[in-house]
Image (cartoon, rainbow, N blue to C red):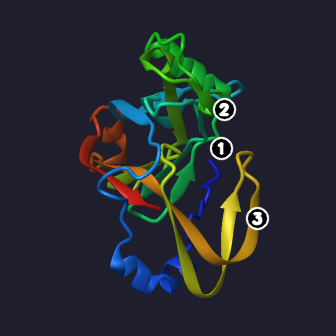
Amino acid sequence: MKRIAVVIAVAVAAAALGLAVAAGPKPSEVPVTWELGIDIYDVVKPILVTLPGADEPSVFWYLRYLVSNETGEDREFTPVIDLATNTGYVYRIGTDTPPQVFQRIKGLHNQPLLLDLHAMAGRILQGEDNAKDGVAIWPDFDSQAGVIEIFISGLSGETQTIHLPYPVDQVTVDPDGNESMQQVTEVTLRKTLKLTYALAGEAEARLTTPAKLIGKQWIMR
């Protein structure tokens, strides 16, 4: 699988941000703008899927979630969900995920109303009856990773803009997996839900040993 290096603030930018990062931009303790509700179903899980033309199954990872809108008006939801390993790789949903994987997950959990990334994006009407079930899917990642972090943004309108000491190159990846580079002088951080999971020590054991949720917090990313 192609490893997608998705950069919210690339390593160079992170270094440039030194003092700002050390200062720890944090979301407001009390919401200052609209915020969608999110419930996470179970922990992040692996699934084996034999793709058309393949002799052996491939491993993918997925996380099911429910997004609801109790903000007082209809909202546009543009989900951006990344999986980062403690070995330095970042994977964004929407790339390297064949449709057969989504269909397998949908059938496995008997969720006929389950939506993929593209179907989740768009207007979410108010009220519990209009909540949407979604699933984030990633290709298998570094076998040496022992901890992964999942970042879910698009749930809140809260942002903070950080001005960089000097321009840096930033790499971005669009939903089709196309990379581009541009020079930036500031970065916009968004209120983001971070989920941290510990994995089994051996790569083979991950298929049978559930990941363990060890952290859940709102951050600015």
Residue occupied by mark 2: 118
Work out how far the residue at label 2 is from the one at label 3, CA to CA, in angstroms: 21 Å
Mark 1 highlights which residue?
95
Left of 183 or right of it: where is 67?
A: left
Residue 108 percent across, percent down from the top left:
46, 15
Helix, strand or loop for disc 1: loop
The kind of residue on which mark 2 rests is: His
Q: Which of marks 1 and 2 is in front?
A: 2
The three-letter code of the residue at mark 3 reads Ser
Residue at 67%, 68% in the rendered image: 171
Mark 2 burial class by Cα count in 10 Å: few <14, some 14-19, many 20+ = few
Q: What residue is at 53 percent from the left and 19 percent from the top?
A: 114
Which of pointers 2 and 3 lies earlier in the amino acid sequence? 2
Contact? badges 1 and 3 (CB < 8 Å) = no
Question: Is residue 151 visible to the viewer in this orientation of the structure?
Answer: yes
Identity of the residue furthest to the front in this view:
72
Position of 129 compared to 121: left or right?
A: left
Kind of element beneath mark 3: strand
Examine the rendered structure and indicate whether residue 120 appears above or below residue 14.
Answer: above
**Sequence order check: which comes first, mark 1 or mark 3?**
1
Q: Residue at x 60, y 55 (%)?
A: 3
On the image, the x and y values in percent for residue 58 come to 55, 34
Cα separation between marks 1 and 3 = 15 Å
Left or right: 19 as drawn, with respect to 89: left
User: Can you identify the residue that label 3 sits on?
Assistant: 180
Residue nearest the observer in this picture, 162 or 100: 162
**Marks 1 and 2, Cα distance to the nearest angstrom?**
11 Å
